Image: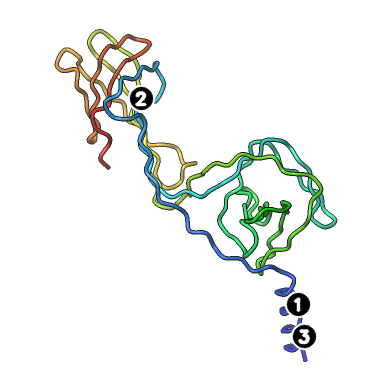
Amino acid sequence: MKTTLMLLLTSILISCGVQTKLTTPENFTTNIPELNISNNTEIGITLVSKETGYKYNAVKITNDKKVKTGFLSRELKAGEIYINDSYTSKFNLYRNINEPTFGIAIPKNGGKQQVFLNNGMGIKLFQIKDIIDFKVTHTPVPKKEYFKQEFIYNGRVGNALKFIYREYIDDIARPAFTQDLQYDLSESKIIGFRGLRIEVITATNTNIEYKVISQFQK
């Protein structure tokens, strides 16, 4: 009898939830700036960056908004990111990265936005009165082969140019690995590190003009 009741309860719970499918994140590589283009930047600013990993389509909330999920009221705050990591036949689902059980359901073929809750067996959709304001963006997937390298100008003393190399691996919230570097400009105007090659055009203690000849080679 108990087994029958448990099976009946499970069936009811599943029937209350809309089943979802997972979205496959997109592999990406981003190099900044372009090669062989003159650039000018100040001390403390990143000269060169290379980012590789996986990313989701996402939306960034632009205005605060309160919505109802049943008897509960929830607030969407400006600046929050919602990632499109799942979908149904009718909706693309954007989950709050800080609250995985709550998100926004955006219709694939037009229609009203909705919000949803995930009970672990599927999602429950809730209609809302007002439109949620957002802008479309992308966000890296943490802990999935993520790697970022940065090369930062740190000033000039005499003929010596100083730089900071920084990298992030997997968890982008983890403190970065950092290495201080110094080059003698009187020896060559071409400096390099880990495959990166930069031609220094002019440099002072406050800014630097440069061209990137080749990017980092991981």
- Can you give x and y, in whole percent of width and height, for residue 15 in the image? 73, 75
Residue 5: mark in rendering: 3
Give the residue furthest to the right.
71
Left or right, 202 with reference to 114: left
Please tell me which of labels 2 and 1 falls first in the chain.
1
Q: What is the spatial separation of the Cα atoms under label 2 and label 1, in whole angstroms?
A: 57 Å
- Report if the CB atoms under discs 3 and 1 are less than 8 Å apart: no
Q: What is the spatial separation of the Cα atoms under label 2 and label 3, in whole angstroms?
A: 64 Å
Is residue 94 something that shows in the picture?
Answer: yes
- Can you give x and y, in whole percent of width and height, for residue 217 in the image? 25, 40
Left or right, 109 with reference to 114: left
2 vs 3, front mark? 2
- Report if the CB atoms under discs 2 and 3 are less than 8 Å apart: no
Which image quarter: residue 184? top left
Which image quarter: residue 160? top left
Left or right, 119 with reference to 45: right
Within 10 angstroms of label 2, few (less than 14), some, or many (20 or more) residues? Answer: many
Residue pointed to by mark 2: 47
Per the image, label 1 sits on a secondary structure element best described as helix
Amino acid type, label 1: Ile
Q: Image height check: is 56 above or below 13?
A: above
Q: Residue drawn 41% across and 20% down?
A: 44
Residue pointed to by mark 1: 12
Q: Image height check: is 194 above or below 82?
A: above
Q: What is the spatial separation of the Cα atoms under label 3 and label 1, in whole angstroms?
A: 11 Å
Within 10 angstroms of label 3, few (less than 14), some, or many (20 or more) residues? Answer: few
Q: Nearer the viewer, residue 61 or 4?
A: 61
- Can you give x and y, in whole percent of width and height, for residue 10 in the image? 72, 78
Q: Residue drawn 47% across and 54% down?
A: 25
Amino acid type, label 3: Leu
Q: Residue drawn 27% across and 16% down?
A: 161
Amino acid type, label 2: Leu
